Amino acid sequence: MSNRWYKEEDTDVIWWKDDPNTIGEFVFSFDKTTEFNMFRDYPYKLTKEQKQIFDKENPEWADFFKDRK
């Protein structure tokens, strides 16, 4: 089975990668080309605009990582 990109909601900007061969890794993308690992890259590798989009679409994760600057 190959990787699959999906959105949590049809109106979302962020795509999530479903990789059946990987457990515990949360990979997301804004364009399905540049991939971000949520635990390693958020918020450090996101632009200001990307972080705003991520936080809006994923408030529970934004709260989880609120101590990261």
Image (cartoon, rainbow, N blue to C red):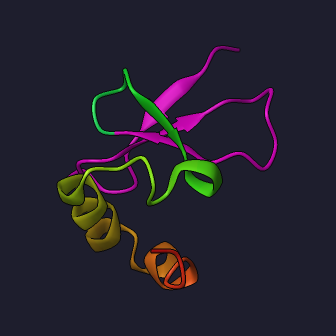
The verdict on residue 11 being magenta is yes
Q: Is residue 34 left or right of residue 47?
A: right
Q: Taking 30 as reference, is 22 left or right?
A: right
Which residue is painted at 23% across and 61% down in the image?
53
Classify residue 18 by image quadrant. Answer: top right
- Quadrant where the image shows the C terminus: bottom left
Residue 56 spot, x, y in % from top left:
26, 72
Q: Residue at x 42, y 47 (%)?
A: 45
Q: Nearer the viewer, residue 18 or 55?
A: 55
Of residues 67 and 50, the one nearer the viewer is 67
Q: Is residue 60 above or below residue 4?
A: below
Instruction: Please give the name of the residue rendered at 44% of the width and 60% of the height, measured from the top-left corner.
Output: 43
Task: State the image coordinates of residue 11 (x, y, percent, origin top left).
Answer: 18, 54
Q: Quadrant of the N terminus?
A: top right
Report if residue 69 lies within the magenta region. Answer: no
Give how far across and how far down residue 36 sits, in percent: 49, 40
Position of 45 with respect to 1 (left or right) is: left
Task: Identify the residue at horizontal 40%, vertical 70% (top origin).
Answer: 58
Segment colored magenta: 1-29
Query: Magenta-highlighted stretch: main secondary structure?
Result: loop
